[in-house]
């Protein structure tokens, strides 16, 4: 299973610094980064491999709020997807 997230953020440099610092927490919650893209100065996309969907959902519903505050994230759009 994979997870793709579109982040809306205030500053790409602040977002990237906080995103990199959050890698260990995401990893503990079953999320492995496959790719990170910057759409423009206000949006980034991340594609994750998800080894533990329940832990990843719990992270998104709780602990991710700390990352969002540190990264200046004002909105996210997350989708769990599978290859068919």
Image (spheres, rainbow, N blue to C red):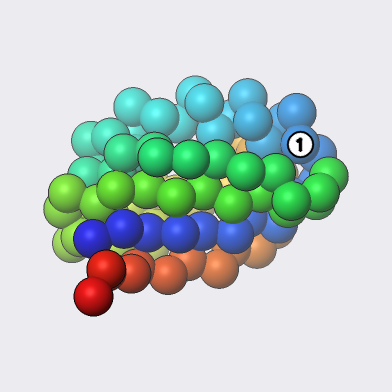
- Up the image or down, 3 lies above or below 63; here it is below
Residue 41 found in image quarter: top right
Q: Whole-percent x and y of residue 49?
A: 29, 48
The quadrant of the image that shows the C terminus is bottom left
Judge whether residue 21 can be spotted in this image.
Answer: yes
Q: Whole-percent x and y of residue 73?
A: 67, 51
Which residue extends farthest bottom? 84
x 76%, y 36%: residue: 12
The quadrant of the image that shows the N terminus is bottom left
Q: Find disc 1 in the rendering and name its residue.
A: 12
- Up the image or down, 37 lies above or below 4; here it is above
For residue 43, side relative to residue 50 (left or right)? right
Q: 10 Å neighbourhood of mark 1: few (<14), some, or many (≥20)?
A: some
Q: Whole-percent x and y of residue 57?
A: 29, 62
For residue 11, side relative to residue 59 (left or right)? right
Along the line of sight, the residue nearer the viewer: 68 or 15: 15
Judge whether residue 67 can be spotted in this image.
Answer: no
- Up the image or down, 5 lies above or below 27; here it is below
x 27%, y 69%: residue: 82
Residue 70 found in image quarter: top right
Q: Whole-percent x and y of residue 78?
A: 47, 66
x 65%, y 63%: residue: 75
x 45%, y 59%: residue: 4
**SS for tag 1?**
helix
């Amino acid at each position: 299973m994979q997870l793709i997230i579109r982040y809306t953020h205030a500053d790409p440099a602040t977002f990237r610094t906080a995103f990199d610092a959050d890698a260990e927490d995401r990893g503990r919650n079953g999320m492995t980064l496959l790719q990170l893209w910057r759409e423009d100065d206000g949006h980034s996309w991340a594609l994750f491999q998800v080894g533990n969907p329940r832990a990843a959902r719990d992270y998104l519903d709780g602990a991710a709020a700390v990352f969002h505050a540190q990264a200046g994230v004002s909105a996210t759009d997350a989708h769990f997807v599978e290859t068919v």
